[in-house]
Amino acid sequence: MNITEDLSIIQLVINASLVVKLVMGLLTVVSVMSWYWIFRKWFAIRDARIRTDRFEREFWSGGDLGTLYQGALNDRRRSGALERVFEAGFREFTKLRGQKSLDPATVIDSVRRAMRATYQREIDDLEAHLAFLASVGSVSPYVGLFGTVWGIMHAFRGLANVSSATLAAVAPGIAEALVATAIGLFAAIPAVVAYNRYAHDVDRLAVRLESFIEEFSNILQRQLK
């Protein structure tokens, strides 16, 4: 086998030491899981943004709140985060506004708490598994580096058994070790980019939901006067 064949990616992986193979295998599994959640979160956040835009247009078009509420109840499968926040608030409002023993401030405070609880559940759902992407982005390079250090150490230990140290003798061992770092970076870079992007998108959606809670609370407060 010549040096070119020895340095092919497949041969480097096959000929790697057991520890380096385990590191490569772990990083490959983590990378696959990372890409799975990258696509899942992309679809989830895009869907949440589209549904939020759609409900905002319906809400601020001046339609009847009762009609919007019934629409949210009748079509839960298509409802988005903002619509569910609205539904929770309006349900609490209709339940409490007929109770004469409660003053308007108490009613609005209860409505705001109901919307806040739903808001937190929606944001938690959108943020689910983002911590995994953050962990992959921060840890994978170090795991790959560990494989590289171990592989280089293994390559230099092998030189003790040869009479003369040449580049041809040490190059395959160093190359297979560097593959571990490459796989670690391949796992980490997309995860870091995706995490930063999705965290930013979730923060923007959170701001929109918080603004809606305050604006809707003011609308309901005016209806109690």
Image: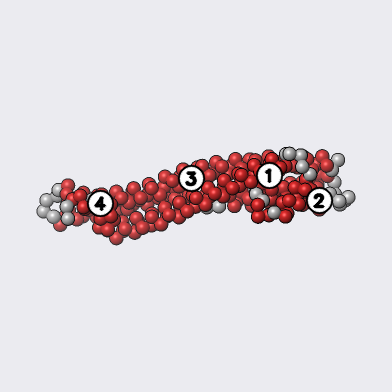
Q: Amino acid at mark 1?
A: Phe
Q: Assess disc 1: are there few (<14), some (14-19) or many (≥20) residues with their C-alpha within 10 Å of its C-alpha.
A: some
User: What numbered label is drawn on residue 187?
Assistant: none
Dot placed on the residue nearer the N-terminal end, 2 or 1: 1
Tell which tag, 4 or 1, sits nearer the viewer: 1
Task: Indicate the secondary structure of the residue bearing disc 2.
Answer: helix
User: What numbered label is drawn on residue 55?
Assistant: 1
Q: Is residue 88 visible?
A: no
Near-viewer residue (10 or 75): 75
Q: CA distance from mark 1 to mark 3?
A: 26 Å
Residue drawn at point x = 42 percent, y = 45 percent: 189
Q: CA distance from mark 4 to mark 2?
A: 70 Å
Task: Indicate the secondary structure of the residue bearing disc 1.
Answer: helix
User: What numbered label is drawn on residue 194?
Assistant: 3
Tell which tag, 4 or 2, sits nearer the viewer: 4
Q: Mark 4 and 1 residues: CB-CB less than 8 Å, in contact?
A: no
Q: Residue furthest bottom?
A: 18
Q: CA distance from mark 2 to mark 1?
A: 20 Å
